[in-house]
Each structure stands twice: as C-alpha cells, then as structure tokens.
Amino acid sequence: RDYMYPDMARKEGLCSLLSVPMMVRDKALGVINSYTSVPHVFTGEEVKLLQAIANQAAIAIEHTTLIEKSHEMQEALAVRKLMERAKGYLMRSKKLTEEEAFKLIQRQSMDFRKSMREIAEAVLLAGELDQRVEKQRG
C-alpha cells in the first residue's frame, strides 16, 4: 500500500509489492520481493509461502558462507603447518632461531613478490633436494 518510489513503480508497471526478510538464526541476510503488475492484496498464505522461501534461501546462503569459512580455515591451517615445517628446516639446517627463520621467509616473500606459502614450499623443496644430493654422495 505504501511504496517509497511510486513514480518508479508506475514506470516499471508494478502495482503490488510484498517484501519479506531472509531470516536465519534471528538475523536478516536480505529481502525477497514479490511484485505484481495488477493490484493485489497478498493473503496470509502468500506471505507465509514467500517467507518460507526467503528463509530457505537464507539458510542456503548461510550454509555456503559457512562452507567458505571452513575452506578458508583449512587453507590457513595448511599454510601454518607448511610454515612450521619450513621454519623447522631452516632452524636445523641454517642454525637460525624460530624468529630468524620466520623473518627470512617473510623477507623472501616480499623480495620475490611471492606468498609466504610459496616461499615455504620452495624452502622445503630445496631441503628435499639437499637430502637427495647428500644421499647420492653417500
């Protein structure tokens, strides 16, 4: 009945509007709108149906967000483990402190414009290469 932009609604051919929040765990993630091109008073059943659809959409959005966060956390943990291994290798092979090993990786990351993950992988790969060379030498 009350619309903020009546001129725009008329221009678009819209007569009736039903807006319901997309709710999940008492949090609104957005709004779903339903428009009609002819005057229409939405029934309670129509409101309930659109609200159910909106809530299902909100659950799907929340689910996707949680999956993305989980993947980000798994990636962060993998990088952390990789960094720990690379620091450990540098500490053993180059007699560095943990802080020195971290700063070396960090500095190389900036100098080569590579991620710390890439530098840590390179350190570990170089370490494996050193071990293979030593084995071949006997």
Image (spheres, helix red, strand yellow):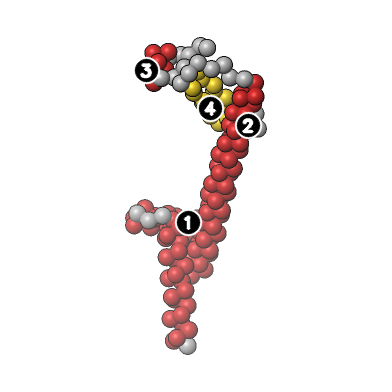
Q: Which residue is nearer to you in this view: 105 or 15?
A: 15
Work out which residue is located at the far left of the displayed protein and give it: 112
Circle 3 SS class: helix
Check disc 2 and report the residue beneath it: 52
Label at residue 75: none
What's the residue type where badge 4 is placed? Val
The dot on residue 11 is: 3
Q: Secondary structure at mark 2?
A: helix
Badge number at residue 31: 4
Looking at this view, name the residue that lies furthest to the front.
38
| Residue 135 spot, x, y in % from top left | 48, 84
Give how far across and how far down residue 38 sits, in percent.
Answer: 48, 18
Write the residue at 57% across / 24% down. 20
Provide the secondary structure element on which disc 4 rests. Answer: strand
Question: Mark 4 or mark 3, which is nearer the start of the sequence?
Answer: 3
Q: Residue at x 41, y 19 (%)?
A: 13
Residues tagged 3 and 1 counted as in contact (Cβ below 8 A): no
Mark-to-mark CA distance, 4 and 1: 47 Å
Quick one: 138 or 92, which is closer to the camera? 138
Which is more N-terminal, label 4 or label 2?
A: 4
